[in-house]
Amino acid sequence: MRCPYCGHEDSQVKDSRPTEDGAAIRRRRQCEDCGARFTTFERIQLREVGVTKADGRREPFDREKLMRSIQIACRKRPIDGARIERLVSGIQRQLETSGESEVQAQQIGGMVMEALKGFDSVAYIRFASVYREFTEAKDFEEFASSVTEAAHKN
């Protein structure tokens, strides 16, 4: 593993343990050249999944990009980081086990929307504002009122 500080190619594993959800292994490493310590995570990847964007571009599925977008939607909300991690792991696992090598970006967005609906209404609306490309305040109002109506029905 390359050191993120000096770029040296060798590091020594000092400690390994599973993450809380058991979906990854957390490893503490030390660079053999500069002595800096850093953490890496090792996850199971069942298959490579490609994502087709709305404009037709294709790119590999990026777990970290998905994680960042969900964290932005959940910023300053009472949602535990481990819960977000489980959500991202669950979506990634669904994509890898679907048998499809290509998925539409809209499909992933829909999966996130469905999961956030049960998490937190504010995070749900925040994510929807980007996913559904809200352009005016009335877009927020209409969507927020539909979320409120649905919550009162349940």
Image (cartoon, rainbow, N blue to C red):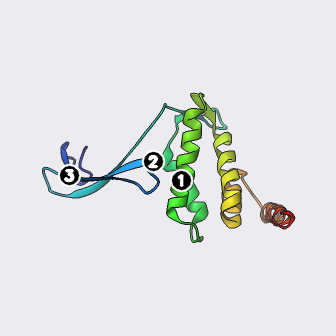
Q: Which mark is residue 86?
A: 1
Labels 2 and 3: the sequence-earlier one: 3
* CB atoms of marks 2 and 1 within 8 Å: yes
Quadrant location of residue 50? top right
Q: Residue 23 carries which label?
A: 2
Judged from the image, the secondary structure of the residue bearing numbered disc 1 is helix
Local crowd size for mark 2, using a 10 Å CA cut-off: few (<14), some (14–19), many (≥20): some
Labels 1 and 3: the sequence-earlier one: 3
Q: Which mark is residue 6?
A: 3
Residue 138 higher or lower than 57, as above or below: below
Q: Which of marks 1 and 3 is in front?
A: 1
* CB atoms of marks 2 and 3 within 8 Å: no
Q: Which residue lies furthest to the left in this view?
A: 33
Q: In which quarter of the image is the C terminus?
A: bottom right
* CB atoms of marks 1 and 3 within 8 Å: no
| Residue drawn 69% across the image and 52% down it | 113
Can residue 80 be seen in the rendering of this structure?
Answer: yes
Residue 39 higher or lower than 59, as above or below: below
